[in-house]
Image (spheres, helix red, strand yellow):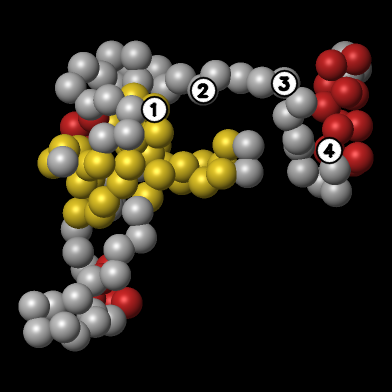
Amino acid sequence: MINSGLEWDWMDNIKKNNGVFKDTKTYTMKPIGKYILIKKVKESVKTDSGLMLSGKDVSDIRYKKGVVAKPGTDVDKIVENDVIYYDSRAGYTMVIKGEQFTVITERDVVVVE
């Protein structure tokens, strides 16, 4: 298989940046369809009496809080910067330009604040 110049540029970029591809172009990320790009919100969970819940108890909570970074092209009711609660068992984590995001679908959202 012969590599094109574009593939060599990509490999050179990785070698120059200690094994990490660093994008030098500016892109406007836009999820397609019903996908939503969110940033997870870390919550400290306390009971009414002021006790902190353990990590196990927190992981048992099904719905997590997040902030919408960018809604998909076919998402109508949810806009950028909305605070949402979504099914924690849904979605996938990805890294874009060094930031961690979670990609979920519109049907995974249960509450919009």
Q: Are marks 2 and 3 in contact (CB under 8 Å)?
A: no
Disc 2 to disc 1, C-alpha distance: 8 Å
- Is 45 situated left or right of 29 in this image? left
Mark 4 Cα shell of 10 Å, populated few (<14), some (14-19), many (≥20): some
Q: Indicate the position of residue 49 as horizontal and vertical percent values.
A: 9, 84
Q: Which mark is residue 90?
A: none
Q: Indicate the position of residue 63 as horizontal and vertical percent values.
A: 20, 54
Which residue occupies 26% across, 35% down?
82
For this rendering, which residue is in front, 96 or 89? 96
Q: Are marks 4 and 2 in contact (CB under 8 Å)?
A: no
Q: Indicate the position of residue 91 as horizontal and vertical percent values.
A: 35, 42
Residue indicated by mark 1: 70
Q: Are marks 4 and 3 in contact (CB under 8 Å)?
A: no
Question: Outermost residue toward the left?
Answer: 48
- Is 28 situated left or right of 108 in this image? right
Which residue occupies 84% across, 16% down?
6
Residue indicated by mark 2: 29
Disc 1 to disc 4, C-alpha distance: 28 Å
Query: Looking at numbered disc 1 in the image, what kind of residue is underneath it?
Result: Lys
